[in-house]
Image (cartoon, helix red, strand yellow):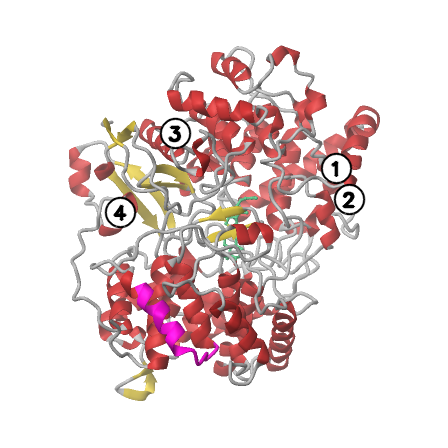
Amino acid sequence: MSVRKRGQSNGHPNGSTKPLQKIDDARTDPYRWRLRNDRGVQTWHYLQTDEEVKQWPITVADKHYLGLGTGLPELPPAKTPMQAAENGLKFFSKLQLEPGNWACEYGGPMFLLPGIIVTLYVTGMPLSQPEQTEIIRYIFNMQNLGDKNGGDGGWGLHIEADSAVFGTAMNYTTLRLLGVSPDDPRMRKARGCLYDLGGALNGPHWAKFWLSLLGVMNWEVVNPVPPELWLLPDWVPISPWRWWIHMRQVFLPMGFIWSKRWVYAKADTDPLIRQLRQELFTQPHDDIAWARYRNAISPADDYNPKSWLLNLVNYLLVLVWIPYLRFDWLVERAERWSWKLIQMEDANSDYADLAPVNSPMNMLACYIEEGPDAYSVRRHRERIHDFLWLGKDGMMCCGTNGVQNWDTAFTIQAMYETGFATRPEYHQTLLKAVEFLEDQQFLEHPVGYEQSPVFSDPPTAKTSPQYGYRHVRKGAWGFSNKAQGYTVSDCTAEALKATIMVQTLANPNDLSKTLFPVVIPEQRLKWAADILLTMQNKSGACSSYEPTRGSERLELLNAAEVFGRIMVEYDYPECTTACVTTLHRFNQLYPNYRAPEIRRFIDTAVQWIRTNQRADGSWYGSWGICFTYAGMFAIESLATQDETHANSERVRRACSFFLDRQNADGGWGESYRSCETGKWCPHPDGSQVVQTAWVVIALVRAQSPDREHIARAVRLLMRRQRPNGEWLQEGIEGVFNKSCMISYPNYKFIFPIQALGMYARQFGDAEID
Ligand SMILES: CC(C)=CCC[C@@H](C)[C@H]1CC[C@@]2(C)C3=C(CC[C@]12C)[C@@]1(C)CC[C@H](O)C(C)(C)[C@@H]1CC3
């Protein structure tokens, strides 16, 4: 391997606009890294020999991700919005990958790599040296140093967050497990930050879980994660099958491991673990009365304090249940059933699993149950690579195993909305993109659904333990790829919408014919619509992976401390809009297919969108930051009912909400603090390209007459465009669970292109100075 010393990459961490101080750090040779994309399964490879480098040339996309400069040419300067949109598309289309999709560094959360590295450490299955080198580089690059977030040397929950114990203790531990010396000045600084926050004992539940199984903490410090809950009958209102899928799928392996109080076998003899026992705490390790710190948490981590009820439950579990009532036969049954459910999750996703939190936990559960040589463990170990991404700041863990379907569906829609879809020079790009979606659609339900008592065709939202309480999926799309295998309401909707858009485009030379061949046949489009029809809540709205299965009161049992609104599925304007607008379009194409149900779906969903609007005209967004994101969607829903600025007071209020917050430079900028606080918070760095584009799209869809305001925003988008057509990374764009931000780097291409094109089509493509 060629590891060379070099100045640190000179960019900013993805999502942050603050430059970092220069640090001399070991790194690998960026020109030797390649992204492999095997039908949407994306992995990075470090080429060892010059021969390999010759055989596998670096691509424009690789160079773009690695921050090496794409070398793409300067384009004729754009004078009109449509020319700017086209320049943007010219650049972005060069980043399309061989299977037809787009990819990106899907970063932000700072608690994902630690879970992976701890798991690989305790199972003795380390990553390769180049990967380790790049992970070290990434974590240091994300450290709050210099003028980044106070520069205290710690890490936050996500890359733009202030330091807290979760991020600091876990990333410090990760660096140590990867061989970084505790005497490195950045490590000293990190320890100082950790001690100021009270040390690792002040970490949230998940930190205590990981550090206990590593043998640095003691299991007594971990609040109970009883797998017995899985034995509750399904009708019980708190049964885990009713929880939001991410929570129950993390709770599952966590409960299995907690139940066994499993600890890394060599913890007591491994010098590194013994050192960590000294480094992570403010008091001597041997003196710590672990049980006293179960509820200790630093204010910096305590975004969502535990409820009185949960505290009471924990108290009873620890003092009564565990010592007196946790009979062996019950434990045995709970662990057996959990293990079965873990196996179902692994089988349904070919060991990719739902996300990189439960994936390493499931790997560890397999290791505990089946030993290091089992196929399950080896397959998990391979799958870990699907989450790792090499960017200009080093190697990180993505929030999912990619953004394949999601970004591809939006790119297709942007090409359609701007009119580029009918231009011959983009025919190939578009066709490949739809072919990718075709390849990624799920064509089978979860294993076991068809043999279960709840089977029906068309399917319903009913579920059953027989197949792990999953939602149906035949005809659906997931967020990332087919391997991962989970239906998401809006991912299905946006992919279906994109497909219908392309397949219904008329041939400009012969309007009786379509421009594109049928890539996804009618039957499969109908399956997708069937899935959407299973996704509606009683309220009329849609959630993310499944309709809501439990009461919001379950939030009283939210034990994670660092996240809000995680226990059940909620109603989201974004997901609702995706389903409404897609079913609307589907109904135009197939007016006889399940028409009364679709009509009812749309009516109740749009009615929910109306009632979900706040008095100030805004909608709260849960997956993008924040009011600018949700407003764009909600207005799109209303537009399907021809509700516009001219005829709807509601739409006028939504437009005023935006216009009142336009910056002097013509753009909009909203901070992630909006998501945390539920109140509009301006972005500290001013206007943001992505949010400006979202608002332009919203105002155009609303048919706002305030042309001059919109033109000013369009000018800003044009000014920020580089001569090669690209836009540069600005602040972070996405969010989940109210408190954790996540990057969507392709949004800076997709939405400005769409906004510029939509503006030009609505108001004319006059020159803009
Ligand atoms: C707390 C835990 C388990 C953390 C792991 C991270 C996941 C929970 C996050 C990472 C990416 C994430 C934000 C995502 C979503 C849910 C939660 C995810 C999977 C969904 C699918 C929900 C619906 C949204 O409209 C949208 C499609 C944008 C996102 C995509 C990413």
Return the residue at label 4. 62
**Residue 594 rendering spot, x and y as whole percentages:** 60, 79
- Asked if the stretch drawn in magenta spans residue 705, the answer is yes
Instruction: Give the mark toward the camera: 4 or 1.
Output: 4
Return the residue at label 3. 127
Residue density around tag 2, few if under 14, some if 14–19, many if 20 or more, within 10 Å: some
**Residue 213 rendering spot, x and y as whole percentages:** 59, 24
Q: Amino acid at mark 2?
A: Leu
Residue 365, labelled with which disc?
none
Specify which label sits upstream in the sequence, 3 or 1.
Answer: 3
**Residue 81 rendering spot, x and y as whole percentages:** 28, 72
Marks 1 and 4: in contact by CB < 8 Å?
Answer: no
Label 4 lies in ligand 1 vicinity (Cβ under 8 Å): no
Asked if residue 426 lies left or right of residue 535, the reply is left
User: Please, is residue 142 above or below residue 472 in the view?
Assistant: above
Question: What's the magenta region?
Answer: 702-717
Return the residue at label 2. 232
Q: Amino acid at mark 1?
A: Glu
Main secondary structure along the magenta-highlighted residues: helix
Q: Amino acid at mark 4?
A: Asp
Work out how far the residue at label 2 is from the one at label 1, CA to CA, in angstroms: 7 Å
Return the residue at label 1. 228
Work out how far the residue at label 2 is from the one at label 3, CA to CA, in angstroms: 39 Å
